[in-house]
Image: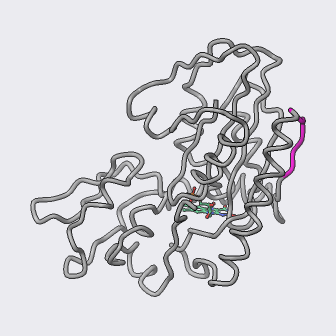
Amino acid sequence: MIFWFSGTGNSLWVARQLAASLNDTLVDIARASLDGTTEWTLKPGESVGFVFPTHSWGPPPLVCKYAKEMHLNGYTSTTHTWMVTTCGDDIGLTPEILQKALGDIKLNAAYSVQMPNTYICLPGFDVDDFTTEKTKLIAARARVEKVALSIAERRNVTDVVRGSMAWFKSRIIRPGFVRSAMNDSAFKVDADACSKCGLCAKQCPVGNIAIDADGHPQWQGDCTMCLGCLHKCPKTAINYGNITKKKGRYYHKGK
Ligand SMILES: Cc1cc2nc3c(=O)[nH]c(=O)nc-3n(C[C@H](O)[C@H](O)[C@H](O)COP(=O)(O)O)c2cc1C
């Protein structure tokens, strides 16, 4: 059983590749959270996986919340449990943070997969240039095949890119980021550019976007900061303050 979360499609693509390789089933964490479904039953010998993006050197808070709330019937100390996190660069102490949220469910393996970057809301952060994006997407294919093999062999490994100053990033920067930068108050729509297609609301994994009487998005204050709305808008009409106006856009096309 593979539990996944994704904002802009990188992690969903990885989850789908792994599900196909491992002949496993997928569970959408955001959907399950919205539905209030936390109880799952494992088949004998079934393994459990988590696939999600790294958000500020840790799992998205929604993933931690779900990991804390979920209950796995049939889980035993022999259940192979793994995580794969996609990232633009590095993941810091993401496995340790997920492990804490999982409590008695013990992570046996952790992997990271570098993919095109989606974080663009602070100075100095932008999407990758075209060549880097293509290079990362090609490398990700081979990387996911290798990860799938390792999971199939039930290896107990931590095969991740932690990056420099992992502790500082995950334990000092991350809490401040989660507190102050993971909110939707700065999202805005350019009403002239917006085609009122409603894609932003439809694709929002947590149902945080309502469409107002004029057909424009209104953020409802319960955002995970996945940036799916901003990156997928076909008219580039969504921005985070003014800082993203001159930044690029990216989402995984699913192939
Ligand atoms: C709010 C936010 C925070 C991010 N933080 C990190 C990070 O700490 N390290 C990193 O390498 N990439 C970071 N990224 C980039 C994403 O982890 C990366 O692009 C990921 O593959 C996106 O996955 P998704 O398309 O499934 O949402 C961040 C992206 C967002 C939106």
- Of 237 and 69, nearer the camera is 237
Compared with 74, 83 (above or below) is below
What residue is at 41 percent from the left and 84 percent from the top?
A: 245
Task: Determine the main secondary structure of the stretch shown in magenta.
Answer: loop
Q: Is residue 80 magenta?
A: no
Count numbered badges in the picture: 0
- x and y percent of residue 143 in the render? 80, 58
Q: Residue furthest left?
A: 213
Viewport quadrant of the N terminus: top right
* Relative horizontal placement of residue 255, taking residue 184 as reference (left or right): right
Say which quarter of the image contains residue 228. bottom left
Say which quarter of the image contains residue 192. bottom left
Compared with 101, 252 (above or below) is below
- Of 25 and 235, nearer the camera is 25
What residue is at 54 percent from the left and 60 percent from the top?
A: 254
- x and y percent of residue 148 in the render? 78, 44
- x and y percent of residue 156 in the render? 90, 35
Say which quarter of the image contains residue 76. top right
Q: Quadrant of ligand 1?
A: bottom right
What residue is at 70 percent from the left and 80 percent from the top?
A: 132
Q: Which residues are magenta?
A: 154-159
- Of 176 and 67, nearer the camera is 67
